Image: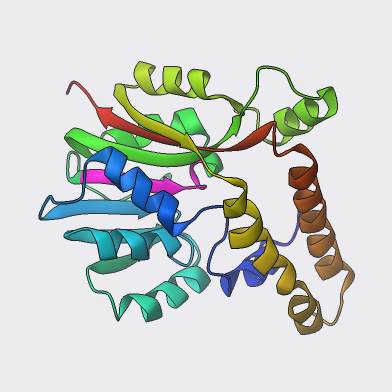
Amino acid sequence: MAHDLQLVVDLHADGARQGPGGDDETTLALTLAGLPGKSDLKIADIGCGTGASTLVLARELEAQITAVDRFDEFLTGLETAAADVGGITTLAASMDALPFAAASLDAIWSEGAIYNMGFAAGVQAWRRFLKPDGILAVSELTWLTHQRPAALQTFWEDEYPEVDTASAKFAVLERCGFSPVGYFVLPERCWLENYYDPLQARFANFLERHANSPEAQAVVADHTHEIERYERHSSFFGYGFYIARKVGG
């Protein structure tokens, strides 16, 4: 269901996360990518939201990090938190119109956001910004089994036609000039404890802010259905975390 985008942003703006994830999982992806211990890194965190992953990158790496999101409401919260960390610059921009110079980044990070462009389109578009051997690390909606309930498959194929298995996602990466480095699936706590539970806790204040309007109620209802869908079918889909290295020119 299409909603007033500003209502959706308002619901998520005061959240620590705008999607499933976890600090430990970001750290694991960093380790698989081989980035800790390197110096003078230049990294873009694309679709950063309020910066949960950005802050982990800044704490774990010696890096200059550009945190990119199209919504100023998200970046405002990150700027406050980043003041205590250092190394983070925020940039309000669309992920399909990034201003980076070719071959200027050591790594591109994007947790739960590349779907906004589409996986293949994002991988293709962002590759040129990476230096040779640069790292691409993204979490992406992924089928966890070969077979799944027909109704669930129909729903996700309508919502996000690029939903697919990890093997198919890695095939896309390879076709687009990347070599696989690592992969893991986000555990359920990244969805439930880290994202959905805090989200549900904000529903009442969100509805109060918007005078319990039908539009606000519809946003809450849609998110409630999303949570219920995951709780019923978490064995069939989740987020895969893909780490790959740019190869060739």
Give the answer, above or below, for where 174 lies relative to 116. above
**Which residue is drawn at the image coordinates 73% and 45% (left, top)?**
230
**Which residue is drawn at the image coordinates 66% and 34% (left, top)?**
237
The percent position of residue 223, horizontal first and vertical second, equals 76, 57
Q: Is residue 154 left or right of residue 195?
A: right
The percent position of residue 171, horizontal first and vertical second, equals 43, 17
Which sits in the foreground, 11 or 22?
A: 22
Give the main secondary structure of the magenta stretch: strand
Indicate how the structure is coloured in the image: rainbow
Give the answer, above or below, for where 55 lies relative to 20. below
Give the answer, above or below, for where 242 lies relative to 89. above
Outermost left residue = 39
Count of number-bearing discs: 0
The percent position of residue 227, horizontal first and vertical second, equals 76, 52
Q: Is residue 52 left or right of residue 230?
A: left
Which sits in the foreground, 185 or 137?
A: 185
Residue segment shown in magenta = 106-114
**Which residue is drawn at the image coordinates 14% and 51% (left, top)?**
37
**Which residue is drawn at the image coordinates 71% and 28% (left, top)?**
157
Outermost right residue = 214
* Quadrant of the frame with the C terminus: top left
Which quadrant of the structure image shows residue 200? bottom right
The percent position of residue 71, horizontal first and vertical second, equals 50, 65
Give the answer, above or below, for where 34 lies relative to 5. above
Which quadrant of the structure image shows residue 31? top left
Q: Is residue 172 left or right of residue 194?
A: left
**Residue 219 seen from this side:** yes
Is residue 209 covered in magenta? no
**Residue 122 seen from this side:** no
